[in-house]
Amino acid sequence: MKARCLLAVALLGIGSASASGIGISLSYLFPRDGTFSTPVSPLSVRDIGVTFGQYVGVSAGLSLYSMHGLALRSGDDLAVVYPNVIGPVYTGVASLAAKVIAPLGPVRLTASVGGFGAYLIDMHTIDGGFDKLVREEEEVTAVTTDFTIDGSWGFGWVFGGSVLVEITEEFGVLLGANYYLGGAPVTITGSYSGDASGASPPPYLDDVSIDLSGLEISIGAELLGGL
């Protein structure tokens, strides 16, 4: 009996699901303790998904950014951050989130929470970034580093909201913001020399992540009901 009830609920949910739309937006990312980042292509894909009735749904997004400067953080400690060490690096970001919708006539307010994954492509380090980091941590005047960084995948949470204004039954204008909270674990190898020296990176670089936290602002258009 219980199995039949669950099946009936599932079928009812599937039957009430509909394409929510697909959005194209101009998006910019402001990394925490990093440098303003621009999209590689001028547009990002937004709000790919389905709705279950008027008030809830699931949506996905996809963007490709050129990150000019990203910070390192100490493991999972969000308070210990080393600004502007990594960059430039191309970063693909994909997100999947549950959303709650408040339809107010031609205006639709949406709040969302979910997860994201990121892939860092062709990673570089900022010239002098590691030198400055070690100098400040060791409290010395002159240090030269020869570090190599390895790691490509990052994950985390994403929270956001948007306002959609319907212009016609098929088309709307979208303004939204998301906050990403996550990181990409990396391994740092190499040596450093000068007023402080070592045959391997100092201990505070043993457990670090590239900080992928930051605020994203998007403005664009949405095809209501999908393609």
Image (cartoon, rainbow, N blue to C red):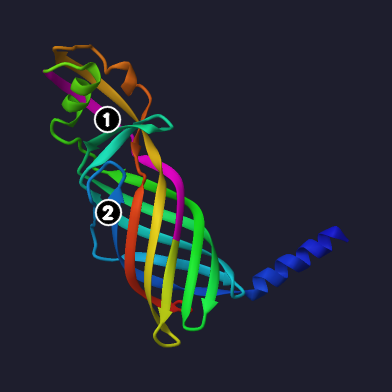
Residue located at (43% from left, 85% from top): 170
Magenta range: 142-160
Q: Quadrant of residue 63?
A: bottom left
Is residue 227 in sight in this rendering? Answer: no
Q: Is residue 114 left or right of residue 30?
A: right
Residue receiving disc 1: 149
Is residue 98 in sight in this rendering? Answer: yes
At mark 2, the secondary structure is strand
Q: Is residue 2 left or right of residue 159?
A: right
Q: Earlier in the sequence, mark 2 or mark 1?
A: 2
Amino acid beneath label 1: Ile
Q: Is residue 195 left or right of residue 162?
A: left
Magenta stretch: includes residue 145 = yes
In the rendered image, residue 45, in percent from the top left (x then y), is placed at 36, 65
Residue receiving disc 2: 65
- Indicate the quadrant containing the C terminus: top left, top right, bottom left or bottom right: bottom left
